[in-house]
Image: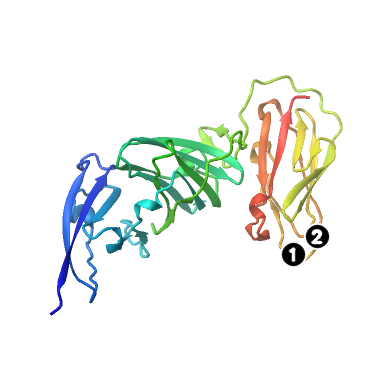
Amino acid sequence: MRSKQVLQVFLAALCWLSPSARPLCAETVTLPVVASVTREARAFDDIGVSLFGAPGSVGAVEFTSSGGGESLVVSSQLRSPVTGGGFVGMFIPGLPSSAARVVTVLTGLVNGDSRTNVGAYNPNEKAVTATIRLYDGNVLLGTKSVGLAAHTGTQLNNIYDQVGFGSLVRSNGYATVESSDSGSPLFTYAAEADNKSGDLILIVGAQDVSAPPGFNPPTATVTTTSGAPTSTPTPPSSTPTPTPTSPAVVIVSLVATQFEWTFTGEGANGSTLQARVGQTYQLQIRDGDPPGTNAHGFSGIPSLGISAQTLTAGGPAKTVTFMPNAGQLGDSFFSCDQSTCGSGHDSMLGTIRVVNP
C-alpha cells in the first residue's frame, strides 16, 4: 500500500489595482501527494475570480506550504482579454523569496508597436520606495518613484509614456529598479504587450548593483509642440538671448566606425561637438568602416532640425546643415539606428552641445 502525504498550500492574493477588491484575500488549497512514488499537479482557472473573488484586479500571489519551499513548484499563465488576440499568453514562474533583489535591471524594453509595463512587488514586512530609472543607451529618459506598503506592489503601464517619451520607438531600452532600503529586496518585472494582438512577453528583473557615487548620466527632457512630446531626448529650453550675425559655414566631419562616433573640425572633441548659437554648421556624415561590413546609421536630432541619415559602409558622406538657436542650449543626443551593425551597437552614442558664442 502506498501512503499519501497531504501538502497544505496557503495562498494569499494581494490585489492592488481594483478599488472594489479586498486588500488581502486568503484561500487554502489542499494537494494530496503520493510520497516518493508519484507527483501531482493542480491547475486553477481565472484565480482572481475563482479563488479570491476579485475580478478586474492585478496583483501578486504568495504561496507557502507545509512541506517547505522545495516541496512546491508554481507557474502561471496570463491571457490577454483583447477580443481576437492574446493567443500566445505569458508564462510567469513562481519565484522563491531568495530571488528578490535590492537593485534589478530590466533589459530589452520596447516601445512603438509594443508597449512596456514595469512592476514591482514588496514581499517585506515594512514599507519601501521603489525607484524606476528608464534609459535610452546611456541617456536617462526619466525616473519614477512609487511607495510600496508591506506585501503590496504596483505596475506602471506604458513606462515610456509615463516619463514623457511615448512616441520614442525603441527595441533595446532598459530600466533599473532600486529599493530604498538595502535590507528590503523587491521582485521586479517588465511585461511587453503587443499593441495589436495583446500578446505579452515577461522579463524578470536580473540582479544589478547600485550606481557608483558620483554617477550622473546624461538626462533628457521633453520639448513640446502643441502639447505633444517629441520622440527624441532634447535639452531644456532657456531664456532667449540675441542671436549674433551668422559667420561663414563651419564644415565638420562625423564618422561612424565600430563602435563609436568621431567628430573632426572646429568644436570637435571625440564623440561630442560644441556648436555655437547663430553659427551655421555643415555636417558631413559617413560610415568609415570597410565596404561590405554591416552599415551604421545616423538617428538624427529632431530637436536641432537634423534628419536621420542612411549610411553605407565605405560609402560617400551625407550632408546636413543646421544653425543652433538660443532655445536649443544644452546637450542633444544621437545614436546609431542600425542595431545590426554589431555587438557594440549600444555604445554608439554622440552629443551636440549648443553653447552661447
State the quadrant of the N terminus: bottom left
Establish if 227 lies above or below 4: above
Instruction: Point out the frontmost of discs 2 and 1.
Output: 1
- Tell me residue 253's x, y (percent): 82, 45
Residue most extreme to the left: 1
Quadrant housing the C terminus: top right
In the figure, residue 197 lies in which quadrant?
bottom left
Say if mark 2 contacts mark 1, CB within 8 Å.
yes
Q: Earlier in the sequence, mark 2 or mark 1?
A: 1
Kindly indicate the quadrant of the structure image that contains residue 186.
top left
Residue 283: percent from the left, percent from the top? Answer: 79, 43
Judge from the rendering whether residue 20 lies leftward or rightward of residue 219; answer left or right: left
Q: Which residue is drawn at 57% across and 33% down?
A: 221
Farthest residue, direction right: 248
Alpha-carbon span between mark 2 and mark 1: 9 Å
Q: Is residue 53 visible from the viewing direction of this image?
A: no
The residue sitting at 55% across, 33% down in the picture is 224
Considering depth in this image, is 280 or 314 the residue closer to the camera?
A: 314
| Residue beneath the point at 63% across and 52% down | 346
Q: In the visual, does 154 lie left or right of 328?
A: left
Q: Element under label 2?
A: loop
Q: In which quarter of the image is residue 38?
A: bottom left
Question: Where is mark 2, residue-wise?
Answer: 314
Callout count: 2
Between 148 and 228, the one nearer to me in the picture: 148
In the image, residue 74 sits, relative to residue 264, either above or below, namely below
Q: Is residue 185 above or below residue 2?
A: above
Please state which amino acid type lies under the numbered disc 2: Gly
Label 1 environment density (alpha carbons within 10 Å; few <14, some 14–19, many ≥20): few
Disc 1 marks a residue whose amino acid type is: Thr
Q: Position of residue 47 (x, y in %)?
A: 22, 56
Residue holding disc 1: 293
